[in-house]
Image (cartoon, rainbow, N blue to C red):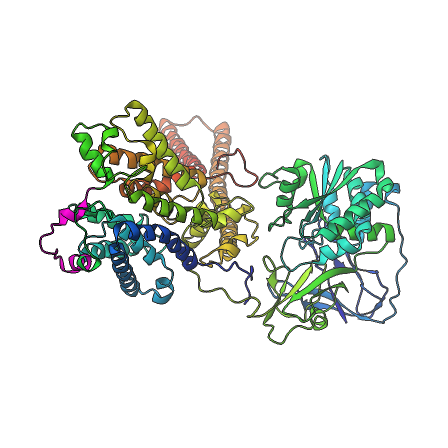
Amino acid sequence: MLLTPIISKPDSVARIMFKVLLALLPGIALYVWYFGPAILVSIALASITALATEALMLKLRNRPIAPFLKDNSALLTGWLLALSIPPLAPWWLIVVGTAFAIAVAKHLYGGLGNNIFNPAMVGYAVLIISFPARMTHWGAPSGLATTGLGFAQQLQYIFLGEMPQGIELDAVTMATPLDTLKTHLHLGESVGKIFNLPIYGWIAGHGSEMVALGFLAGGIYLLVTRIISWHIPGAFLGSLFFIASIFRLAGDTIYAAPLFHCVSGASILGAFFILTDPVSSPTTNKGRLIYAAGAALITYLIRVFGNFPDGVAFATLLMNMCVPLIVLYTQPPVFGRKGKQR
Amino acid sequence: MLVVPLHQHAGEAAKPVVRAGDHVLKGQLIGMPDGFVSSAVHAPTSGTIDAISLQLIAHPSGLPNLCATLIPDGKEEWIERKPVDYRDHSPSELQHLLRMAGVVGLGGAAFPSDVKLRIGKQKISTLILNGAECEPYITCDDMLMRERATEIVQGAEMLRSMLDAHEVLYGIEDNKPEAVAALQQAIRDSGPALQQGRRHEVVEVPTIYPVGSAKQLIRVLTGLEVPSGKLPTDIGVQCFNVATAYTAHSALAQGEPLLTRIVTVTGNVHRAQNFEALIGTPIAELVALAEALPDTNGYIMGGPMMGFPLPSVNVPMVKATNCIIAASERLFPAPPPAMPCIRCTRCVEVCPADLQPQDLFWFAQSREYGRAQAFSLFDCVECGACSYVCPSHIPLVQFYRFAKSEIRAREHDKKLADQARERHEYREYRIKREKREKAEKLAAKEKAALNAKLAGAQPLTPQQQAEQAELDAQRAHILELAKSEVENTRQ
């Protein structure tokens, strides 16, 4: 039986997800350049765990395994989580986080297309609440640490938990630019002075700002190929800039520059890759603006006034909860019903 | 052999006015319009009526319908043709002529054109000639515009004068430059002939499906949106297909009823082409002429987006047959298995009705029909654009059709149930009322009898008076009971 339309666009979920993975590559390349290849190990671990958990859950749920394994969505969850946590961490950290993200946040909610929360961010939230200390050991960018670890030594630490003799973990890791800012502000130092520390580069963290620009390049690719629309990244970065500007005007010695907030932490990654997850974000354009602006506000508040190193993950999860309501109240008018309420 | 269905148009089927064995001339009426929305059907050529019988027709249901079978005599003998000058006749006379010439919309819906011209007191400012032909593969209107632009323009002017519209806009997709040029030339050539110098203008519209859908074309050309549930005439616009204007011209200026149309035969064929074919021609003949390839696995009537599969090629082409597409696994591979919706909203971006297809899909799937209606399911025009772009390959249109038919079926059932309940309640009420009336009548009778007795009798003894009072009280009580019961049922 022929069903019309008998023609269709040669597109698929797998292809869309693949393009998103592709868009992450420039950021990942710069990550490796500035912070060493440990991130590749995290991504590999996350990928294997994501696919294995996905296959297991599909089998338990009696769903066809092959088409869903090939849709690249589990891989994307794994990659995003790997990019959100410190690469220099014991192997089981990323494995636990990814497995939880896929098994609980994705499949227990009904699998692809049915998860209310962004699975990668659920994985992140679980890790930061369960293993806060492990989540703060960020590797220092090349050239900043007093001693460096070779790739073999990094692997040794990740899989065996052994540091080379005479080197402490603290010697090769350091606080993130966001954390450093918070700590030094508590010591009563002014923003201007703090930014003279070697950890900072031109606009944000040395090295991490370049990684963020890599993700920005990928994000622009997603915009150009119309995988995502401008609404979420535009409203998120715009609102973050706006909120940070207001605080900055209120006191430029205690509040960091707006551009710093837009490039620091997971701002760029969140704006283009995390908040834009179609399944857990609003389907209306007006709703997307509200959702992203809300996420920017929460991100800023958590970063500046909260205790967590960054706020993008919790902001995403909190706004995910509001999505059904946002969508319900931002329905655009239907053809021929302009100006009329539904 | 030609098979001419009597129901080729929207509305009521035409009533056969010939019998098996009759000899008919080309253009002779064989089906009389029956009802307000109906149209005439004619013999496409001269010959003998072989039968008036149920035959398989081009309809998705695959159910047979009443058709006249004509065996041509090969002489092509015409009935007497009576061309008229449209300027000498009133609009209502012209509408009647179009109705009797079997002129219907040739864009696909086959709605009787005379009905669309009966606009009552409404004022029409703009007449739109639809030459968008937006579905891929279909080229019949393109060819007609290229080759017979003059007749189209003259036909459009006839339609314009009947509607008393101020201007005529020809909406043509910008991928048909030859058609645009031909129509512009035809408008220039017939310049002085156009009555009162009314403006005829060709407007190129972007080639974006479904720009040829009437309401969408009106929005593109005029910026006006036809309100939901209303007709274009409610905002002073009327829309006809260019091929309809052409047939209107033939019907009036040549006196020739609608006997042929242009049909595109394409897809999995060796020679894709347009034919001008007689209504009633078996589709099998057309696909044989176009040399359908051996791996053809089915045929679509209409376009690849909104057409429907033909139950068989042994059906006649009708006035609505604009295109026949031969399908094959190679040309139109079956879509991969559907994946879950990931709410990517590609469907929202392409929906011409500005709906939220992903939500409608969700509601249709979970059978939340009330919410589907609240999200304007019935504004969906089933153009298939959402299905086309869906990266999860969900047959969205099929879900909407299913939900619509379920809702219609439920509304029908509910209406029947409501009627049954009303009937039942009225019956209950009637029974109670009859009971009460009976009781009242009885009481009145007894009282009358008693009074008559009393009139002629001695005054009652105290004992009799007491008995009488008791009887009256009992009767009053019964009456009260009956009354209250009736009241209760009414509530």
Residue B88, horizontal then vertical, whole percent? 89, 42
From the viewer's perspective, is A175 left or right of B66? left
Q: Which residue appears at 9% of the width and 53% of the height?
A: A166
Q: Is residue A162 magenta?
A: yes
Q: Which residue appears at 87% of the width and 40% of the height?
A: B192
Establish if B283 lies above or below B111. Answer: below
Residue A302, horizontal then vertical, whole percent? 25, 36
Residues drawn in magenta:
A154-175
Q: Which residue appears at 74% of the width and 49% of the height?
A: B180
From the viewer's perspective, is A140 left or right of A270? left
Q: Is residue A197 magenta?
A: no
A289, A182: nearer the viewer: A182
A75, B212: nearer the viewer: A75
Residue A142, horizontal then vertical, whole percent? 24, 48
Q: Is residue A328 visible?
A: no
Q: Which residue appears at 80% of the width and 52% of the height?
A: B100
B294, B155: nearer the viewer: B294
Residue B108, horizontal then vertical, whole percent? 67, 55
